[in-house]
Image (tube, rainbow, N blue to C red):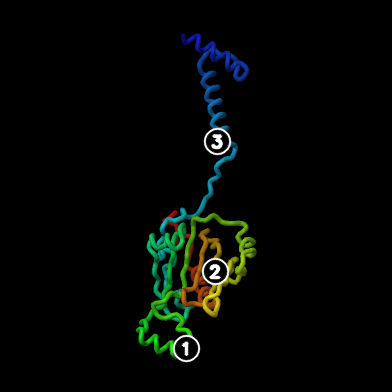
Amino acid sequence: MRFGFVIAACAVVLAQVGCSNDDEAAKRYAEEQARKITKEKAGTAEVVKINVPVKGGKYIECADLFPDVDKFGTGLPDKVRMHQLDQRQQTRRQPGVNAICEFIREGERPTAEQQKKMSAKTERLGTLPGDVYCEVRVDCGRPAQKDFESKCRTMPQHTGNRDLGVFACVQQSQRAERDAYRYKFFEPDTGCYLDILGGPSVTGPEIPVACAKTAIEEITKASIAKYQ
């Protein structure tokens, strides 16, 4: 019975591997054909693995990214404290990013009555103590895009510049009677994308630019090392 099986196998593999009186030839041919069929079913496209610094959505502590919060205050009108959105809040605001860090103006917040008196003297109250000066979103799970600059320049309400030392895609949008600014850029040391937004009451480019400059100085490879 075994001899008959080998003869049959030999007949099948004759043109491919030559006749042999052992089972190995048939086994090799069967495996080769199985691989061929599997490849045909899967298609000719190969899966390309894309390396990113940190998996998208993996939570990174803002304290690791920006350990010296006081540095943010040096470029802003007042001192700030840092607040991080928890994972649920972060996912609601922007799924896939690794951290959303808010920098909030320090100081005692005016009472409602005090704010009423202030608004009688000025059209805008501006950024009060307790309000967000800027927000930094960190995305290390997004592969570097070679066409990041060219795509940015084709989008409406977007411009680009290298005032930060790297190319920044700048979005300008109207906020009340003034303009708000948003800066997105690739940080080459970590390989992460940073997205800097002014707080809800912030207009003009000055505060987002100040936050962006400090964020670039603060974040390093060491900031994300333990999350890789």
Label 3 residue SS: helix
Please give the name of the residue rendered at 50% of the width and 16% of the height, measured from the top-left corner. Answer: 23
Q: Left or right: where does residue 159 sit relative to residue 62?
A: right
Quickly name the residue at label 2. Answer: 183
Residue 55 in percent (x, y) is at: 46, 53
The disc labelled 3 sits on which kind of residue?
Ala
The disc labelled 1 sits on which kind of residue?
Thr
Please give the name of the residue rendered at 56% of the width and 72% of the height, measured from the top-left corner. Answer: 173
Q: Left or right: where does residue 78 sit relative to residue 25?
A: left
Distance Cα–Cα, label 2 vs label 1: 29 Å
- Whether the residues at callouts 1 and 3 have beta carbons within 8 Å, the answer is no
Quickly name the residue at label 1. Answer: 122
- Whether the residues at callouts 2 and 3 have beta carbons within 8 Å, the answer is no
Q: Nearer the viewer, residue 165 or 26?
A: 26
**Of the residues tagged 1 and 3, which is closer to the observer?**
1
First of labels 2, 1 by sequence position: 1
Quickly name the residue at label 3. Answer: 42
Label 1 residue SS: loop
Distance Cα–Cα, label 1 vs label 3: 67 Å
Distance Cα–Cα, label 2 vs label 3: 42 Å
Against 114, residue 151 (above or below) is above
Residue 96 in percent (x, y) is at: 46, 57
Circle 2 residues within 10 Å: few <14, some 14–19, many ≥20: many
**Of the residues tagged 2 and 1, which is closer to the observer?**
1
Q: Nearer the viewer, residue 71 or 13?
A: 13
Please give the name of the residue rendered at 41% of the width and 68% of the height, measured from the top-left corner. Answer: 67
The disc labelled 2 sits on which kind of residue?
Tyr
Label 2 residue SS: strand
